[in-house]
Image (cartoon, rainbow, N blue to C red):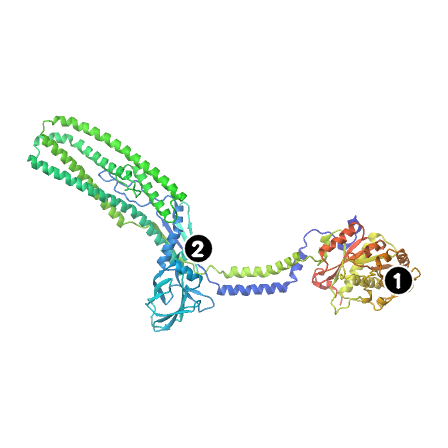
């Protein structure tokens, strides 16, 4: 019904689409703030670009050798001579973890002595000095516990000042301690002992430098710092190419860290490889000592037997038989040798030692594979134990795998030994058949042959172990690096941070966004009515009759004839919209318009007076009534009205003539004013008088418009008592003054019919919020 009632009001079109022009205008009118904030942000951005520490990225790449033991080659003796082919690498993830480990970074920082930093504090900001310091700290011994205490008290930073002629002065700004010394002298700071020596390129007695600050830091903290910045990535999942990347203020330092890290990684890998070889060498040396003693015993027994029996040579008669059994002896010799090696390995496994097993002692490929894998797991477990406890889940898992592999190796060797024993038994049977043929040979001959056979076995095993020891020694001397360097560490040509384009771009964006955020935030936090849109949001079915500009004290507050001001034009628009309301009401004759507001100070008297003047200027007969009996305000616009009788006097006195109370307005000849009159003690009771109805009936017969300046509707009940005499009710809100929550009262009163034909008028709108532009173009035609 409300929409149908006001469908002819042009200002009340419902347009739910986003009005981009309004949104842009709302923000663009604050353009000076955009300029100011943008210039401020750009200024700070330029300062940041100029003074912020530059960051450089250094990159290195390596290829990790994927070394695998494929069984090697065999010598003519039937044994594997390629015992040491390096570690088998099956998981690149392990290598990436090793490269990023803090243990390697600790070694790198310590090798490069980066825990002692050299700083130049002569400029606006402190700059690091790397390889450009006139001196360096050597033989530095640091107590980490005392160093942490010194850091808390800022006593770890000392300025080294050049006194001249090789004399130095160390100054701590925090404690104001001063130490006088010279180059190459021993210096003690409590937490550190060191010497300061001049760099190779620096002349100790020169005075071409003033001061350099040295800063002592724990190796662990420096290592943690660079570990977090280090990036290690596998370039291709199907390859072993790894890229290392590090960002730092000094590109030379980042390059040295990457190169030293690769060197430490190779050194660590070579150490692991050599550990297997060293353990194998120790095992071979122990076996050589045992075999050497056994061989000496056999040769001594042979010598003693011949001396006792006075034997010099074996008769030719045994030559033919010996040739027949040579083949069996040779096989038996090989079986005995393999059986001896197998027994030695089983004895080693039966011990409680968890050292690395000797690799590739001539066993089958499966046994060799178990041994190599067992050694890899031992190395991996030892590596994890350096940074974790023996209760770590990874360590426990490796221990289970190691135990299982040890059992597999033992079982494989037991099977091997059973097979060798079977072969040995078969060979002995064959030898026994031939032995029956030579039974006639002297017992001495058989004993000599037995001794020689034992001698031959020991000599063969001794030579085999000597060969393996030489191969092991060769392996130790030619062990190559695990990581092949593809590209040494190098830095990009320019700094990656701060980027002028990014910094200036961000500053420009922030300079534009900040005013928008402030304006929008102010709108969200401001609960006042500020624009027509705020009134429309409250209830789009209640029309907004007009927006009235904010008037300064210097401007005229009352409209005059031929007035071309913003105020006059807005009231002309308001009266034009009023005609649409009247047409919608199909009202003929006199129209009663009640002007009210929520609270005092929203401008209802100002609106009532100027509305009455505007209507009077059109030639209509208008009467302006002071309906606020408690706080009359019409005298502000025409002097003397506060001292004359008016509405209250008419209502209180049945004999009072209405015509005597009407005053001619000084503002327009068509305008009459009926003042509020004497302030009564009981305004509510007077307004319920029957004479009020007579007052409106008499005025309706003489005037075209009745404008009533009523009391604030929320504060007193006076307005609601007389609203039945109104044809239209204009509810005034003041921009930036009226609280939006107070408008709920107007909505409730309208819903219950307490305010008839309600329309809103927004007063005090600033020119920047008045429509899309200022002044509405009111100078048109001038």
Residue 767 or 176: which is nearer the viewer? 176
Residue 242 position, x and y percent, is 40, 50
Label 2 sits on a secondary structure element that is: helix
First reached walking from the N terminus: tag 2 or tag 1: 2
Q: Which quadrant would the C terminus be assigned to in this image?
A: bottom right
Residue 349 position, x and y percent, is 28, 39
Dots 2 and 1: beta carbons under 8 Å?
A: no
Say left or right for 85 vs 58. left
Could you tell me how many numbered marks the image carries?
A: 2
Residue 737 or 253: which is nearer the viewer? 737
Residue lying farthest left?
310
Say left or right for 54 vs 596. left
Task: Classify mark 2: residues with Cα within 10 Å, few (<14), some (14-19) or many (20+).
Answer: few
Residue 10 position, x and y percent, is 77, 54
Question: Which disc is residue 425 wearing?
Answer: none
Residue 142 or 236: which is nearer the viewer? 142
Residue at mark 2 to residue at mark 1: CA–CA distance: 90 Å
Residue 153 can be seen in this image: yes
**For residue 46, above or below residue 354:** below
Say left or right for 549 vs 98. right
**For residue 556, above or below residue 714:** below
Question: Which disc is residue 649 wearing?
Answer: 1
Task: Classify mark 1: residues with Cα within 10 Å, few (<14), some (14-19) or many (20+).
Answer: many
Residue 560 can be seen in this image: no
Question: Which disc is residue 229 wearing?
Answer: 2
């Amino acid at each position: 019904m409300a929409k149908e009632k006001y469908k002819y009001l042009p200002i009340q079109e419902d347009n739910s689409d986003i009005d981009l022009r309004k949104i842009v205008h709302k923000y663009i009118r604050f353009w000076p703030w955009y300029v100011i904030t943008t210039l401020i942000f750009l200024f700070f951005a330029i300062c940041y670009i100029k003074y912020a520490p530059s960051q450089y990225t250094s990159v290195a790449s390596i290829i990790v050798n994927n070394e695998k033991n494929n069984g090697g080659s065999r010598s003519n003796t039937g044994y594997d001579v390629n015992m040491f082919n390096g570690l088998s690498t099956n998981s690149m993830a392990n290598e990436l973890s090793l490269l990023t480990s803090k243990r390697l970074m600790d070694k790198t920082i310590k090798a490069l002595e980066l825990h002692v930093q050299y700083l130049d504090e002569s400029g606006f900001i402190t700059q690091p000095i790397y390889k450009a310091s006139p001196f360096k700290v050597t033989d530095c011994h640091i107590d980490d516990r005392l160093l942490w205490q010194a850091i808390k008290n800022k006593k770890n930073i000392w300025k080294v000042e050049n006194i001249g002629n090789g004399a130095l002065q160390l100054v701590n700004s925090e404690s104001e301690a001063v130490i006088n010394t010279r180059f190459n002298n021993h210096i003690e700071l409590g937490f550190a002992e060191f010497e300061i020596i001049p760099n190779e390129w620096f002349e100790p007695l020169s005075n071409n430098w003033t001061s350099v600050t040295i800063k002592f830091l724990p190796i662990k903290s420096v290592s943690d710092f660079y570990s977090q910045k280090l990036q290690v990535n596998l370039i291709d999942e199907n390859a072993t190419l790894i890229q290392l990347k590090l960002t730092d203020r000094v590109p030379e330092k980042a390059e040295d860290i990457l190169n030293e890290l690769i060197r430490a990684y190779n050194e660590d890998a070579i150490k692991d490889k050599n550990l297997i070889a060293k353990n194998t060498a120790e095992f071979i040396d122990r076996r050589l000592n045992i075999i050497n003693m056994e061989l000496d015993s056999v040769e001594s027994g042979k010598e003693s037997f011949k001396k006792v029996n006075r034997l010099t040579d074996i008769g030719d008669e045994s030559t033919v038989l010996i040739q027949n059994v040579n083949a069996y002896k040779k096989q038996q010799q090989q079986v005995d040798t393999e059986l001896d090696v197998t027994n030695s390995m089983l004895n080693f496994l039966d011990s409680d030692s968890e050292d690395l097993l000797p690799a590739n002692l001539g066993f089958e490929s499966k046994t060799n594979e178990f041994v190599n894998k067992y050694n890899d797991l031992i190395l991996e477990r030892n590596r994890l134990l350096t940074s974790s406890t023996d209760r770590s889940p990874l360590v426990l898992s490796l221990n289970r795998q190691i135990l299982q592999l040890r059992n597999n190796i033992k079982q494989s060797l037991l099977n091997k030994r059973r097979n060798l024993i079977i072969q040995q038994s078969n060979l002995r049977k064959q030898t026994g058949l031939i032995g029956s043929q030579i039974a006639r040979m002297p017992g001495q001959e058989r004993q000599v042959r037995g001794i020689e056979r034992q001698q031959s076995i020991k000599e063969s095993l001794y030579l085999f172990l000597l060969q393996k020891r030489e191969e092991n020694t060769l392996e130790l001397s030619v062990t190559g690096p695990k990581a092949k360097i593809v590209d040494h560490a190098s830095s990009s040509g320019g700094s990656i941070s701060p980027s002028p384009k990014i910094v200036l771009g961000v500053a420009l964006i922030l300079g534009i966004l900040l005013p928008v955020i402030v304006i929008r935030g102010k709108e969200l936090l401001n609960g006042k009515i500020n624009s027509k849109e705020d009134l429309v949001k409250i209830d789009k079915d209640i029309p907004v009759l007009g927006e009235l500009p904010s008037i300064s004290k210097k401007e005229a507050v009352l409209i005059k004839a031929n007035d071309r001001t913003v105020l006059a034009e807005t009231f002309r628009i308001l009266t034009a919209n009023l005609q649409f309301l009247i047409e919608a009401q199909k009202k003929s004759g006199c129209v009663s318009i009640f002007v009210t507001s929520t609270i005092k100070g929203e401008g209802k008297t100002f609106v009532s007076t100027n509305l009455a003047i505007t209507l009077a200027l059109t030639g209509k007969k208008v009467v302006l009534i002071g309906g606020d009996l408690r706080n009359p305000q019409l005298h502000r616009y025409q002097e003397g009205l506060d001292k004359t009788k008016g509405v209250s006097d008419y209502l209180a006195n049945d004999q009072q003539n209405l015509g005597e109370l009407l005053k001619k307005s000084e503002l327009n000849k068509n305008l009459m004013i009926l003042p509020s009159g004497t302030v009564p003690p009981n305004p509510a009771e007077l307004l319920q008088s029957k004479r009020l109805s007579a007052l409106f009936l008499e005025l309706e017969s003489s005037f075209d418009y009745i404008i009533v300046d009523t009391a604030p509707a929320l504060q007193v009940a006076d307005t609601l008592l007389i609203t039945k005499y109104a044809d239209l009710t204009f509810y005034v809100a003041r921009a930036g003054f009226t609280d939006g929550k107070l408008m709920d009262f107007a909505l409730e009163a309208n819903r219950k019919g307490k305010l008839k034909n309600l329309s809103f008028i927004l007063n005090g709108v600033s020119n920047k919020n008045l429509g899309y532009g200022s002044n509405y173009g009111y100078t048109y035609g001038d």
